[in-house]
Image (cartoon, rainbow, N blue to C red):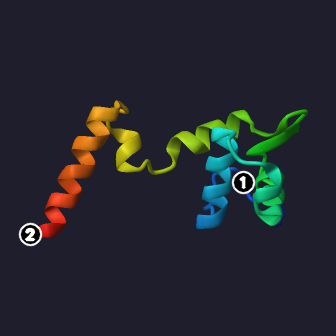
Amino acid sequence: MTRPSATPSANAPLSAPQEVTLRRVAFGQSDVRAMRTHDLAELKRRGLIEESKDGPVLTRAGQQRFKALPKTSIQNESRSFEDMMVQLTTMLDSTKR
């Protein structure tokens, strides 16, 4: 009889806060002090992030997991300023109906 692994796999479901932390590490724009310590520890335990001299970074498994996360509509669309303004205007117009 085999015992289940005590360490969840990199593909095990993430909580919403863990997904946020994974995204923040991926974008590299958040100070590590502003991230949830528990989430960082769990992502590290799962092999999704590792420490570097500049703070946490995604591992190869973390990069794959990040790419698989659902994207916001703005991430899926063109990133030009004009396109974002058109999208915002369309969304605002639809709320007035």
Position of residue 48 relative to residue 9, above or below, is: above
Instruction: Specify which label sits upstream in the sequence, 1 or 2.
Output: 1
* Image point (36%, 40%), residue name: 76
Foreground residue among 21 and 80: 80
Position of residue 39 relative to residue 64, above or below, is: below
Gap between marks 1 and 2, in whole Å?
Answer: 47 Å
- Quarter holding residue 78: top left
- Quarter holding residue 8: bottom right
Question: Residue 58, how many percent across, how many down?
Answer: 72, 38
Evaluate whether residue 15 shows in this view: no
Q: Residues within 10 Å of mark 2 (few under 14, many from 20)?
A: few
**Looking at the figure, which quarter contains the C terminus?**
bottom left
Relative placement, left or right, of 55 versus 76 is: right
What's under tag 2, amino acid-wise?
Arg
Which disc, if any, is residue 46?
none
Label 2: which secondary element: loop
**Looking at the figure, which quarter contains the N terminus?**
bottom right
Of all residues shown, which one is farthest toward the left?
Answer: 97
Question: Residue 71, how many percent across, how many down?
Answer: 43, 47
What's under tag 1, amino acid-wise?
Ser
* Image point (61%, 57%), residue name: 19
* Image point (60%, 38%), residue name: 64
* Image point (15%, 59%), residue name: 93
Label 1: which secondary element: loop
Identify the residue under disc 2: 97
Identify the residue under disc 1: 9
The number of numbered discs placed on residues in the rendered structure image is 2
Position of residue 25 relative to residue 45, above or below, is: above
